[in-house]
Amino acid sequence: MRVLLKDIAEIQTGVFAKPNVDGDVVCLQANDFDEIGNHLGFWTPTISGDNLHSKHFLQQGDVLFAAKGNKNFAAVRTNSLPLAVASTSFFVLRIYKQNLLPEYVKWFLNQPDTIQRLKSEAKGTSIPSISKKSLEQIEIPSIPLDKQNLILKIDQLRISQKELLQKIASLRDQLIQQQLNKAVNI
C-alpha cells in the first residue's frame, strides 16, 4: 500500500530570519549537508530565537527536504543537533503516522527516482524550486516497521561498502605511486 506524503506528515516551510552575531539558534542551510543529507557537523548559532514561533524549532525525527537549487535531498533531525530551525531552502516534514520511520521517509525521498520526479516538476529558471504541492503528492510505500528497518540496515551497509571500496582504491593508488617512485629512484 502507498500513502501520499501529505497524509502522513505535516509539511511546513523553513523560516526566514536575519543573521544575528549574538544568535542562540542554528539556522540550517543546504550547504550544511552533503548530497545524501548527512550533516557536516558545524553548529554555529546564527539567528536569535526571540521572535520565532515554537512550531519552527526542529524536533527529533523531523525530516528536512532541500527544495531549492540543484542540490535536493532529505535529512533527519537527530539528537546531536542543538536548538535549530530550517532555512527557507527546506520543507520540514513532521511525520505523525507512527508506522513510518523518519529515516525510512528520508531514504525514500533520497532515492534517485524520487529526486528525479521532483526535479522534473521544479519551477524557476535561475534557481529551481520544488513546490510543496509536488512534495505532498509523493507516494511512499507503507511497509511494516521490520522491513523499513531492514531496508535502512542494508542501505547503511551499502554506504559502508562504498566508502571501504573508495578507501581501498585510494590505498591501492598510493601503493602503486610509491612503487613507481621507488622504481625511478633505483
Image (cartoon, grey):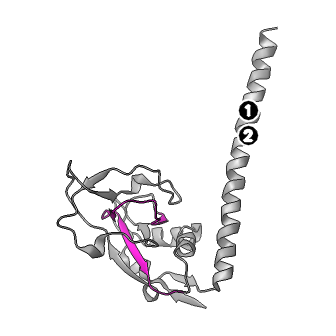
Proximity of marks 2 and 1: CB atoms separated by less than 8 Å: yes
Please state if 87 lies on the left or on the right of 30 as rendered: left
Q: Which residue is mark 2?
A: 169
Q: Which residue is mark 1?
A: 173
Say if residue 126 shows up in the picture. Answer: no
Q: Residues within 10 Å of mark 2 (few under 14, many from 20)?
A: few
Mark-to-mark CA distance, 2 and 1: 6 Å
**In the image, what residue occupies the spot 31% across and 58% down?**
27
Badge 2 element? helix
Badge 1 element? helix
Q: Is residue 58 above or below residue 174?
A: below
**In the image, what residue occupies the spot 76% across and 34% down?**
172
- Please tell me the numbered disc located at residue 5: none
Stretch in magenta: 73-98
Q: Locate the C terminus and report the quarter of the image it occupies.
A: top right
**In the image, what residue occupies the spot 70% across and 60% down?**
158
Q: Position of residue 57 (x, y in %)?
A: 31, 69
**In the image, what residue occupies the spot 65% across and 75% down?**
149
Q: Position of residue 130 (x, y in %)?
A: 39, 70
Q: Amino acid at mark 2?
A: Ala
Q: Position of residue 70 (x, y in %)?
A: 43, 58
User: Residue 112 is drawn in which quadrant?
Assistant: bottom right
